[in-house]
Image: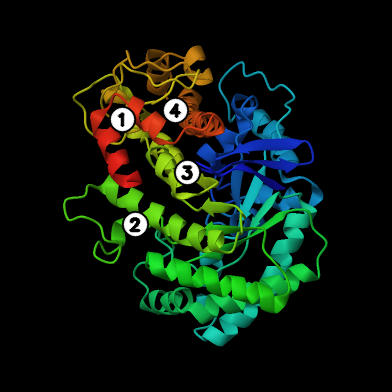
Amino acid sequence: MFTLLDNKNGRIGNFQFKSKRCKTPCFFMTSNFGGGAGDIYRIITYTDLLESSQIPVLYNYYYLTGSGTFKVKWTEHIPKFKNLNGFLLSIRDEFVKLGYCINKYDNKKLNWDPISLLDSGSGNFVRDEIKSSPDIDVILKSFDNKISAFADFCIQHEINIMMSMDFAGKYTHKQGERNSHNYNNLSKKLSTHLTNNLKLIGKTLEVLKTKKYEFLAYVPVHGSSAEEYSIFTKYILDLEKLKDKKFDGFGLGGIANYKEMDNSIWEIPDDANPRIKAGIIVSRAVKAVRNVLNSQKDFRPIHALGVGSAELIIPLVNAGADSFDAHSSWRRATDGSRDNVKFVLDKTKSGSFSKYLIPLLDDNKTVILQHTEKVLKYIPLNKLPDTIFCDCEICRKYSISEIKSLYFNDGEDFNFAKILCYIHAISQHQKICSRLYDDLRKGKTVKELVNEISDQSLKQDLLIIIN
């Protein structure tokens, strides 16, 4: 469950589910298992690198139920397992046997069971339903059974937080979505019409009243402006009264596509760079929801979906978010192309390389003063100086030159190097959350950390956003 400890200068709290605990603010790493193979198999193989941190994980229900593009066969075995994390540890043994690991890999038994959040993947379900029927009423009706099945999955597999189903617009497109007029037209009608999402929310409350469950049920909030996020939140509160049932928290959707949002609607300065634009939009969306809740003395948690990149964590916490996720770390680490592995030692080479996040904090959660530029940015491995400092668990074991050498070797070494870059990045997200928790616990504000930053570009952008 969630406990708010303090909200004087910013919110700090705790998630606790039986023996599992996590301080908030916190970052959720994302897992698209079921929606792909390759690199996703490797992150499961190397779960030992995540054992000490127990970083919470966001999963995708659509993918886990065998609906992913690649039809991953392993998802067929999930119904046999009570705990989803237990299932992943089980197939980890199979992946090692199949050779999805480096040579001489020690497949030890792990104590790994992080807090889990299950996103519905509703956008993909909507796409599939549109292919079957162009009738919105038929699509709405089809979701009645999906809501109940989704909740049952969370109960059966001991999910800790359920992000309820919604009609959300997608900002990443697959299976011809971008060029399908029918899909774009109907999905827009479903996602932008307030009544459609409210019907889904009302049905979810009715279903939850019939279930005995231990997870936290979050309700997704949407809007195309800060005002609409505020209005939608008020409608949800009214609906909860009508149905005599409350959600346990709120999830902010639709803000991950901030690049496409209208500057004038969000009052973005004309000269704002992409980081400032993103920070202002996510901050205003969170504040809009938080202000409505505060006016009702309602202190339920807020999770910001898909926007918890390292450079936005401080603005999100300042605005009142308790948790967040982002897939950017995974994309930047695994985007590297095998075509370029032999050029990873050539600084002049352009092309697709895996990227390494320049850290802000060391392992003591102290600002790394010698990093004065490109902090919290992803740098292609071939352009990354070997002298960049990081003392995270990954970088204590593997220097940057060793990571490059693994990458250069290709084969399983190449896959392992990408996973090292990824875990290094998400550990930095976790450090920032932990540092903010410590500061807020001591009565400080988020500005205390911002003012210590040596990278003047990052520092000034963050001050503009939080002010």
Q: Disc 1 and disc 2: Cα gap in Å?
A: 22 Å
First in residue order: circle 4 vs circle 1: 1
At x 49%, y 41%, the residue is 9
At x 77%, y 45%, the residue is 83
At x 79%, y 47%, the residue is 81
> Which label sits on residue 421?
4
- As rendered, which of 343 and 109 lies closer to the eye? 109
Left or right: 274 in relation to 324 = left
First in residue order: circle 1 vs circle 2: 2
> Which label sits on residue 379?
1
Whether residue 442 is situated above or below residue 116 in the rendered picture: above
> Which label sits on residue 317?
3
First in residue order: circle 3 vs circle 1: 3
Q: Disc 3 and disc 1: Cα gap in Å?
A: 25 Å
Q: Disc 3 and disc 4: Cα gap in Å?
A: 25 Å
Q: Disc 4 and disc 1: Cα gap in Å?
A: 11 Å
Q: Helix or strand or loop: what does disc 2 sit on? A: helix
Circle 1 or circle 2, nearest the eye: 2
First in residue order: circle 2 vs circle 4: 2
Q: Helix or strand or loop: what does disc 4 sit on? A: helix
Mark 3 Cα within 10 Å, few/some/many (few <14, many 20+)? many
Mark 1 Cα within 10 Å, few/some/many (few <14, many 20+)? some
Left or right: 304 in relation to 256 = right
Q: Disc 2 and disc 3: Cα gap in Å?
A: 18 Å
Whether residue 448 is situated above or below residue 261 in the rendered picture: above
At x 46%, y 39%, the residue is 330
First in residue order: circle 2 vs circle 3: 2
